Amino acid sequence: MEARYTPDNIAELRRILYGCPYLMKVEVKDGIPLNTKSVADLRKLPDWSSDWSLVIPFGRDPWNTVRVEQRTGSSGRRSP
């Protein structure tokens, strides 16, 4: 199971990633100009596009993978 988040800025992204292990792998879908391999890399980003969404597995174990995808419509959870 997983949750899709649609952060609008880097502050929301960092809040969503709270609790994710820094070594958790990140998969970036085609067409997104990011070169990140881990959650630690995502946290270091200077900016975040509101066109991207984040898919995080409920089990925030280091061997799980976070995905960065193109935002689709209004589906997904809004960050708190």
Image (cartoon, helix red, strand yellow):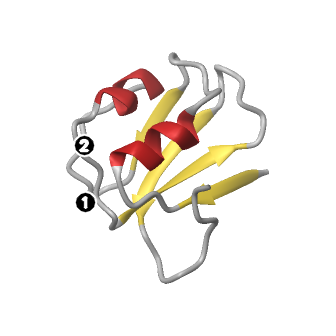
Residue 5: x and y in percent read 57, 58
Q: Nearer the viewer, residue 16 or 3?
A: 16
Q: Residue at x 39, y 61 (%)?
A: 8
Position of 70 relative to 58 (above/below): below
Q: Nearer the viewer, residue 1 or 16?
A: 16
Give the residue number, with chain letter if any, for mark 2: 34
In-image side of 76 versus 27 (left or right): right
Q: Quadrant of residue 41?
A: top left
Position of 16 relative to 76 (above/below): above
Q: Quadrant of residue 13?
A: top left
Residue 21: x and y in percent read 60, 20
Q: Residue at x 46, y 34 (%)?
A: 26
Kind of residue at disc 1: Gly
Alpha-carbon span between mark 2 and mark 1: 9 Å
Q: Secondary structure at mark 1?
A: loop
Q: Quadrant of residue 34?
A: top left
Give the residue number, with chain letter if any, for mark 1: 31
Q: Residue at x 22, y 37 (%)?
A: 46
In-image side of 67 versus 43 (left or right): right
Residue 59: x and y in percent read 78, 34
Q: What quarter of the picture does the C terminus occupy?
A: bottom right
Disc 2: CA contacts within 10 A as few (<14), some (14-19) or many (>=20): some
Which tag is nearer the camera, tag 2 or tag 1? Answer: 2
Residue at the limit of the structure toward the bottom, as seen here: 73
